[in-house]
Image: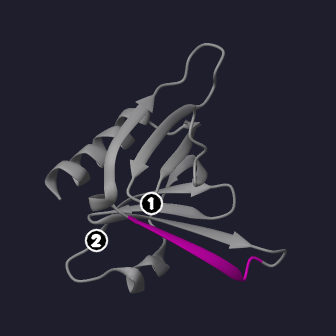
């Protein structure tokens, strides 16, 4: 029986780290890489993955997801194939299963390396 993900995000392309992410950092936390999503951005920091999801017509309502790397129990990555254009990352966490699709402009091995570095050094 396949478990449905509790969250599913798509990272479209790597982008500059948003300037307004600084107030969310705690202690010695710092942003490492950022990716454009369909409606906003996802930022990998030294301690967690932060996904911002702008909602509504004006985009003024913003939902924030914060996934500490310490909650990741296992992950898998799958590169894009000939007929399947999206690469994919799956995270199994204490909260549940999370699926992240990666657009053609996103390097799946860089994401794999970021998660590995964060989880194994955390």
**Viewer-proximal residue, 111 or 97?**
97
Magenta span main SS: strand
Q: Label 2, on which residue?
A: 30
Q: What is the secondary structure assignment of the residue under circle 2? A: loop
Rendered view: 16 above or below 77: below
**Residue 82 left/right relative to 121:** right
| Badge 2 or badge 1: first in the primary sequence | 2
Task: Tell me which residue sits at (44%, 60%) in the image.
Answer: 95
Task: Tell me which residue sits at (62%, 75%) in the image.
Answer: 63
Could you tell me residue 112's position as x and y percent? 34, 39
Rendered view: 112 above or below 39: above
Could you tell me residue 49's position as x and y percent? 41, 62
- Say few, some or many: other residues with alpha carbon within 10 Å of mark 1 (under 14 / 14 to 19 / 20 or more): few
- Visual colour scheme: one colour
Q: Label 1, on which residue?
A: 95
Extreme residue toward the right, this view: 57
Task: Tell me which residue sits at (52%, 35%) in the image.
Answer: 88
**Viewer-proximal residue, 115 or 4?**
4
Can you tell which quarter of the image residue 33 is in?
Answer: bottom left
């Amino acid at each position: 029986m396949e478990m449905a993900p509790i969250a599913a995000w798509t990272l479209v392309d790597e982008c500059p780290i948003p300037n307004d992410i600084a107030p969310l950092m705690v202690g010695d936390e710092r942003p490492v890489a950022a990716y454009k999503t369909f409606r906003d951005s996802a930022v990998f920091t030294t301690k967690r993955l932060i996904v911002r999801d702008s909602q509504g017509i004006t985009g003024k309502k913003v939902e924030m997801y914060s996934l500490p790397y310490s909650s990741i129990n296992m992950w898998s990555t799958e590169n894009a194939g000939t007929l399947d254009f999206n690469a994919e990352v799956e995270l199994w966490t204490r909260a549940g299963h999370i699926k992240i699709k990666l657009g053609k402009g996103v390097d799946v091995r860089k994401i794999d390396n970021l998660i590995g570095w964060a989880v194994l050094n955390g």
